[in-house]
Amino acid sequence: MEFQARIEVFLELLSCAKPLFYWRYDGQGALLHSTCSSEKMLDAVLRHTGGLEYAYTAPKQAPLILNGDARLMWIAAREMSGNSVVEIHVLGPFFGNEPHPDCLDELLSAEEAQASPQWKHALEETLHTLPFLSMPFFTQYAVMLHYLVTGEKIDVSAVQYQLGELTPDSAFPRISTRKPPKDRIQIYRAERALLNAVRDGDLDGAAAMANAADVARVRQYTDNPLRNAQIACTTFAAVCTRAAIEGGLSTTMSYCLGDAYIKSFFAAKSLSEVADIKNQMYMDFIRHVRACRSNPKYSKMVQGSCDYIELHLREPLSIDILATRLGYSKYYLSACFKRETGCSVNDYIKFARIEHAKTLLSTSDTPIAEIAERLGFNSRNFFANTFKQCVGKTPAEYRRETLNT
């Protein structure tokens, strides 16, 4: 079967799932063929984003995702003769997730200033007709198109992504480019600093949280900003969980902690509440890893007791409850716990609650009386006195100082 016939069969198969337009360019960037009725308009957009140039200059012979910003995207495969591009075969465009109105506005405003209002209106109508594909779909389409063009079978992990727009050169004089997106390397470095602090149990490194806020962004997965934040924080909880495990925290403790916070994210009613929970979670993971790394000689029984206490700080706790839950004699558990930790079970419970209170005071606006109630203290005064005994200052003083540092 000749190549054009194979392409037609391939496009018929795609039409059963998520149909896409097909484009074919020659080695100099001229459009040879398209199945799109708005080909001039969308061809101009592809050139504008720098996607077409990237298809000719990408370093490896592998399927390509053009533009690569999870908004308007194309799939491309190159037909090569030695080191020269013979033709470029393109599928698209499509949205990497369901288009948000802000995304459409950004695309429209990014077009050339001299474009007429009628042209922009026509583009807006066209954009509303385009499909959106999740990553499993478009990466599979990419490896299938690559096989169709080159005869090479590859894994989806080999797919290349255009990470930013390029500057036009003399080979493509009609290509104009828009302002490059945020530096993803900078975002990656900030995220790595965040996770390193979790992995190392580094409370000082937690200051990276503030720096990360300047570079991280919440993707527009849906039309609901709260749901977008919840999804983003769920992803953050998952990577913090893995970092904590790598730092030495038990898998049981790590996953229980992560799952508890994920439930809290989706129960939150506002963006500010989600942000508070995120900060609490981050500091909580660091604190748990720090405690785990500083006590590597605890026996399984004592470590299990500590883990249970840390996970149930808001519930009634005592040596009797621990012994019943863990299946040990309370006298044996009490003696081993005191020998290994240097403090009684009741003192450990008190210190653990105070440590968690410090996290809440420094990362949220939760009222002090509510914190006291959450952590099982009978009154705000009792909580304040216990806190000052352990920390050397009242909860209000501690909160003021942490906010001013």
Image: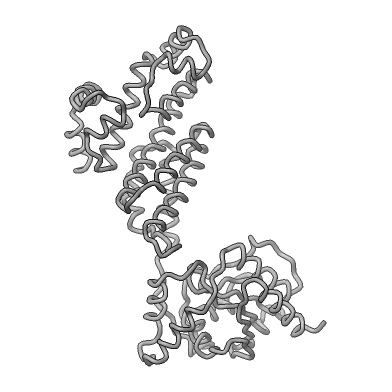
Q: Split into 4 quadrants, where in the image is the N terminus?
A: bottom right
Total label count?
A: 0
Q: Position of residue 404 (x, y in %)?
A: 19, 43
Q: Quadrant of residue 390?
A: top left
Q: Position of residue 197 (x, y in %)?
A: 41, 42
Q: Quadrant of residue 6?
A: bottom right
Q: Position of residue 380 (x, y in %)?
A: 20, 28
Left or right of 233? Residue 84 is right
- Asked if residue 377 is positioned above or below residue 224 in the image, the reply reads above
Q: Residue furthest top?
A: 331
Q: Quadrant of residue 10?
A: bottom right
Closer to the camera, 290 or 7? 7
Q: Position of residue 321 (x, y in %)?
A: 43, 17
Left or right of 183? Residue 157 is right
- Asked if residue 24 is positioned above or below residue 327 in the image, the reply reads below
Closer to the camera, 172 or 75? 75
Residue occupying image coordinates x 23% and y 22%: 386
Left or right of 383? Residue 100 is right
- Asked if residue 275 is positioned above or below residue 69 in the image, the reply reads above
Residue occupying image coordinates x 40% and y 83%: 111
Residue occupying image coordinates x 32% and y 27%: 353
